[in-house]
Amino acid sequence: MRKELYFILIGFIVISFHCQPTKVVTTDFRSDWPTNVNRTFIGPDYWTNRLQDWQLKDGRLECVFAGPNRNVNLITRQLSETPGDFQMSVLVGPLEEKAPVNWSGFRFGIQGYFDDYRDSAARGEGIDAGITGDGRLFINDPESPDNPKTSSGEEGILLVLKAEQAGDNYQVELAAFEPGKQQAGASVNATLDSSQVTGILALVSHYAQSPENPDITAAWFKDWQVTGSKIESFPDHAFGPIMWSHYTFSKGILKLSAQMAPVGKEDGDRVILHLQKNGKWVKAAESSIDPMARTAIFKIEKWDNSVDTPYRLTYNFMSPGNKLKEYEWQGTVRREPLDKEEIVVAGFTGNNDLGFPNQDLIKHVIQHEPDVLFFSGDQIYERVGGYGVQRTPVDKSTLDYLRKWYFYGWTYRDMLKDRPSVAMPDDHDVYHGNLWGEGGKKTIQEGTDKEKQDSGGYKQPPEWVNMVQTTQTSHLPDPFDPTPVKQGITVYYTDMEYGGISFAILEDRKFKSAPRALLPKADVINGWAQNKKFNAVKEGDVPTANLLGKRQLNFLQHWAADWSENTWMKVALSQTIFANVATLPEDDLTTDDIVPRLRILPRGEYAPTDVPVADMDSNGWPQSGRNRALRELRKAFVFHYAGDQHLGSVIQYGIDDWNDAGFAFCVPSISNIWPRRWFPQIGRINQSAKMPKYAGDFTDGFGNKITVLAVSNPVFTGCSPALLYDRATGYGITRFNRKTREITLECWPRECDPSKQGTRQYPGWPITIRQMDNYNRKPYGYLRTIEVSGITEPVIQVINKNTREIIYTIRIPGISFAPMVFEDGTYILRIGRSTDGEMKQYDALKPSKEKTDKKLLVEF
């Protein structure tokens, strides 16, 4: 009877506590949480901080961790900037720990820095109002001695908050009612400026003083109601239970993953993919949800790539009223741009949350109309969203990661749903500062984080690592060789053919050797030699150390020689470039901890004492492993697209000599917590008078030959916040021209609007290179010039007859080509439409020192 009376009274009390007459308004929101579920995901109207600290159980919202500032934000409603009144009520359960510094209740007028509800929900601040552990009501100041005291029982206490406009201010009153009683047990009042009563709303459980075991039901809430003329409704702000989708298309196969919320057993267990055909939705496939990664994965073969195909993902979710409701997420699988002259690939790295949700970046990237999105790694950092990192137990750590991962999807999902994308995890994605994967082994279990990392392998359990990889890579084409590495950790390295471009998707970190044990003289800590007498150029190379490892080198050999019918360009995608493009003051070369504290220089100023560094986290180490990878890549005239280093740069690799291998573009970080720079005082070999001081031929800190064309060093921008805009943040755009075989590289500051006349990229960009420049080795001589008839753009493959090594494979843009070779010998020449079709072969060809007028006429 008391419960029935309580629910009857709520509507009355919200409108008229203290028996004050007021205008009756329609309730804008009521939680009405289902009573038959137990799950982590509260619903699409809410964002929880932290994800693992909240659950919905038997119709109650429970905070299951006694920690500071745990909150659940209502993202589909907010207090408008226009005048009006509002009221809120909720039944609050008693705090487990009665300390007066602990409290639970409301937060309202929540605003973030970037004027976006997502930023507000993640890190916004507002006005707190609630009840403390010792039963005192408060608005804004829970520790005031004047706060009135009330009492609550096991059935909780009803908190009712009312705000009425009074000129430029708001009169706010918070009252407490025992369930079943109409008279307030206590109330407290405050006057607030109108600017404080704008923004989103939340429920809060705050434990400033936590118990010894914080894994308790810290507080609970029931029947949250919000009403009033100041409330605005935004149903399109809902997030979940289908959070977003990724897809790729390659070789006739569509791979699509739906990222789901952590739903409950009582919710649906299948996600259904529908395709639109002839104006109607047709069920195409269904998938179960991965219990850890919360992904549903779809694979459809014989996909029609000639038309845009709208798709719809649907899922049944237990909603208010204990009813399964169908939720959906829609996107479009675009037709493959096989006839498009220019393919545009947008590149991103370093998705730290300063700047979240990156409205400026998204707006600017869309204007380039990218065909493919490439996220090279660090889609999340341990610090994303605040609250640190939880590494154990696995189930809680999984939810900890997923909350951070949801920041990524919440930002980019409107781009991802309609474009193929590649995402690959890097070190921070798996909770490492640096990662030397050592073929998947387990790190040592004792010691500091750096000591664990330096031992090689993964700190987190293999099932957790696989979960991360599933969320980020399950939509990629199937792995080249799916055999797991040590501990059963899965692999994802593969190739993707799209729009005539063949992308090799590499795993930089997984197979890479750890340097500490291999270089005992160096005394390596976190990838840096502590022994100042150690010479990384002369002593740092370990010929047996892995960079990509044998398996990926075998893959590259196969991929470089495979030019199927549509392929006209080869691109390698990886976490980072194969060089160390960074400098530090010459007295600070045993760690890069100083990087975030380095002075940001005005434009045109040059750091006076910087020298190239030897950071073994970069892929400048190991040198022999780096050169083995480059030798395989240049056999297909490969352009290298990557990130990770935080510093935007374009370089050309050198192996035996400068410029004898391919070009690489490292894109700048989206949000840069580690603003590296390149201001070398030493190491310059050749330089044009027109080049800036930091450009030209150099050796990096490991002695690797690199030609630096451009870098995006941090400079003062005058934009706010400076921590976001003065650290050389932005994104990359790479344009591949099928007709000219030119590759145009663009490096855009995130604050610059490319649609505005006069907007400039970072100094030194754009840069245009040619496909053939990616194998710029000086020829020994040339085979006979080929003239082809019957087909255009044939594939040319040159093979050393004695060793059977493929020297290179390329699809030429016309019908004539003079094949170069790099040493004397006898060669085999294969010519055809594609390497998977008819190829004419010519044996025992000898080179001449110069190009000859003698032609090899090839008819098809």
Image (tube, rainbow, N blue to C red):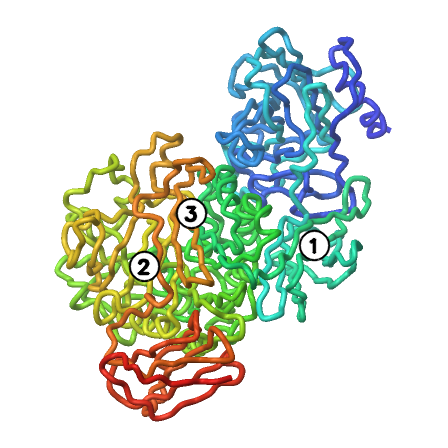
Disc 3 to disc 1, how far (Cα)?
28 Å
- Residue drawn at point x = 54 percent, y = 59 percent: 340
Task: Name the residue: 56% across, 62% down.
Answer: 339
Alpha-carbon span between mark 1 and mark 2: 42 Å
Instruction: State if disc 2 and disc 3 touch (CB < 8 Å).
Output: no
- Upstream in sequence: badge 1 or badge 2: 1
Sequence-wise first label, 3 or 2: 2
Q: Residue furthest top?
A: 167
- Is 856 left or right of 484, judged from the image as shown? left
* Along the line of sight, the residue nearer the viewer: 109 or 583: 583
Disc 3: CA contacts within 10 A as few (<14), some (14-19) or many (>=20): many
Q: What amino acid is at disc 3?
A: Tyr
Q: CA distance from mark 3 to mark 2?
A: 22 Å
Residue 443 can be seen, yes or no: no
Asked if marks 1 and 2 touch (Cβ < 8 Å), the reply is no
User: Under tag 3, what secondary structure?
Assistant: strand
Answer yes or no: do the residues labelled 3 and 1 have beta carbons within 8 Å?
no
* Residue 274, horizontal then vertical, whole percent: 74, 57
Q: Residue at coordinates 53% horizontally, 47% vertically from top-left? A: 408
Q: Is residue 599 left or right of residue 53?
A: left
Closest to the observer: 735 or 117?
A: 735
* Residue 485 x, y percent position in the rendering: 47, 73
Label 1 neighbour load within 10 Å: few <14, some 14-19, many 20+: some
User: What is the three-letter code of the residue carrying label 1?
Assistant: Pro
Above or below — where is 372 with respect to 676?
below
Residue 617 is marked as 2
Using residue 747 as the reference point, say whether residue 123 is left or right of it.
right
* Secondary structure category for the residue under label 1: strand
Q: Quadrant of the N terminus?
A: top right
Q: Residue 439's image quarter?
A: bottom left
Q: Which residue is mark 1?
A: 310
